[in-house]
Structure formats: structure tokens, C-alpha cells
Image (cartoon, rainbow, N blue to C red):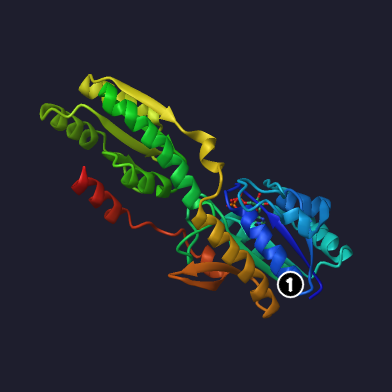
Amino acid sequence: MKKIGILTSGGDSSGMNAVIRAATRTAFNNGIDVTGIVRGYKGLVKGEFRKLNRIDVSGIINQGGTILKTSRSEAFKTSQGRKQAYQNLKDNQIQALIVIGGDGTFRGADIFGEEFDFPVMGVPATIDNDILGTDFTVGADTAVNVALDAIDKIRDTVTSMERIFVVEVMGRDCGYIALESGVAGGCEQVVIPEIEYDVKRLTDDILQGYKQGKISWIIVVAEGGRKAQDIAQDIVTLTSLEVRVTVLGHIQRGGRPTARDRILGGRFGNSAVEFLLQGQRAKAVGIQGDKVVSLSFKETAAKRKSLNTDSYLRLIRVLT
Ligand code: ADP
């Protein structure tokens, strides 16, 4: 193998740069050239390729986002788009591809790899930690810590002003960030898409606590669970207490990657190249316990990874 391509695709997450750095350096150490493909599958179809040199990946380990930029591509979902992508890889003598992204990215990679018998290695990087077969994805730890930092700041005002706050964090289909930051932030309630929203239970808890003299609450909600504004309205209607709302939004995608995400990104990037060198293909790297493993795309795509919501919610119930 003389040359590989690398791209980041779908939603960005902090630590993608650590993966790019590790994969590129591992490739160089094995005498392999690296082509950076700009803007994910969009750039693959358009032929937006640039050679990566050692200097390109130095000083990026601590940067959020991705130096290769990322995007979503409708063209790559068509067979004509993928044919063009394959032609571009052939024209540039690229013999294997590393794709860094989430389950959508892996779906595309699986189809492409099968269609053209082309070696592809996936690296799971998503803030939701929702890829089946890996304990962690790159970027999830940073997103949780960014949300937690905001919750900690909100807590200062919550306790000083004695208020109820509803904080909306990211997670359209998945309550990972909400549950992790909710437990770590000592929050009173968490609303997530995996569990049906129970307005009566929520407001009964608040009213019961209020009767016992409790006057401040933080309720964390994953965006897919319910809109924070709607929950606030429910609480006002059913308890007549004052409620404030904070929507954290895109700040959760950014920020300096945590040590965990940098190390995970380093291990994943390194293993992705090593697995390719071993002749593995149509696989994604993952971590199980302390071991980096390779997973088939079919395994990662079999279903959505389910969270152990009970253990988080139990902890919240018992400790608040
Ligand atoms: P993520 O990788 O973060 O889950 P998306 O779901 O947006 O992000 O997927 C990223 C890209 O992967 C899409 O824009 C598309 O180009 C490609 N992709 C997703 N699903 C398919 C598919 N079924 N066939 C081909 N390409 C796909």
C-alpha cells in the first residue's frame, strides 16, 4: 500500500483532528503517503484532494473541529456520485480510505466498499456515543464536558437565585449527553428521547420537593426528548413556579478535545492504518474495555446502540 485517503464526514466532533494526526503519522511511519479529502464525501465526489505533509498535522491535537472540514453529501447517496468518487480515488492512485464519522458515514462507506471492492476503514467520531460495538466514540467525552461546564455555571445562579432551570443539550435521537451531564452535574431530572416524557411525574416531583422546602432544580433535556421551552411551559402551568430556559446548542460540538478524546482519537487513528495494513476491510475500529477492536460495518449498523438508561436514572433518583 503506497497511498491512502482520509476524510471526515457528517456531524463534526472534537478529537477528529487527533484521529487525522495519528492516522497520518502512522501511515508515514510505514512509508505510505496520505491524501486529505476535503469536506467528506462531497469532496470525494468533487475531487477536492490535497496531499497531507507532516507539517499539516502538527499543532492540531488540541484543536476542536476538523482541519479537513466536513459536510453531508446527497451525491454520494447516488450510484453515479459514488462512481465518480471511485474514479477520483483511482486517478489519484489512492488504494484505501479512512472515513471518520458516525453511522451515516459508515453506511455510505459500507455500500461504497462493496460496490467497488475498495478497502475502507471507519473511525467512530460522534458526540452522541451511539455506535454499536464500541464503548466510546471520539468527541462524546468533550461534548459531555462542555455541557457539564455550562450546567455547573447555571448551578451557581440556580442555587443563588433559587430557581428552576431547564437546560437543553444536544441529542436528537439519543440521551447520552443529557444523562452523562445530568448525573455529573447533580441534576434533579433528565428528559431523553428513549423514555416517554411524563409531565405529571416531573411536576409532582417538583411540587413535592417544593412542599419540603426545596427551591432550586436543574432539569436537563436532550433536544429529541422534548423542547426545553415546552417543558418550562408545562412546569409553569402545573406548578405556577418561575422557570428559566437555556438551550446550549452548537457550543457542545466545539471546544478543545478532552484528554480522553485525544487519546482515543490517537489509538483509533493508529489502529485504523494498522488494520488496513493487515488487509482488513469494510471494518470500523472500536474500543471494548481497554482493547481496540475491529468491527464489521454490518455489526455497527445492525441497530442503534442502546443506553443503560435505568442505571443513570436510578442514580439520579437516589442521589438528588
Ligand atoms: P453521520 O456520519 O454523522 O451519522 P450523516 O448521517 O449525515 O452523518 O451521514 C454522512 C454522509 O454519509 C451523508 O451525507 C451521505 O453522504 C453518506 N451516507 C449516509 N447514508 C448513506 C447511504 N445509505 N448511502 C450512501 N451514502 C450515505
* Relative height, residue 241 to residue 57 (above, below): above
Q: Position of residue 108 (x, y in %)?
A: 66, 59
Identify the image quadrant of the N terminus. Answer: bottom right
* Relative height, residue 31 to residue 65 (above, below): below
The residue lying at 31 percent from left, 23 percent from top is: 243
Which image quadrant for residue 308? bottom left
The residue lying at 51 percent from left, 40 percent from top is: 252
Task: State the residue lying farthest toward the right.
Answer: 91
* Relative height, residue 127 to residue 212 (above, below): below
Residue type pointed to by label 1: Asn
Please indicate, yes or no, whether residue 172 appears anywhere in the rendered image.
Answer: no
Which image quadrant for residue 35? bottom right
In the image, taking residue 276 as reference, residue 307 lies left or right, namely left
In the image, taking residue 13 as reference, residue 260 lies left or right, namely left
Task: State the residue lying farthest toward the bottom.
Answer: 278
**Mark 1 Cα-neighbour bin, 10 Å: few <14, some 14–19, many ≥20:** few
The residue lying at 51 percent from left, 55 percent from top is: 259
In the image, taking residue 139 as reference, residue 177 lies left or right, namely left
| Residue underneath mark 1 | 29
Question: Which residue is more in the foreground, 63 or 90?
Answer: 63
In the image, taking residue 212 as reference, residue 84 lies left or right, namely right
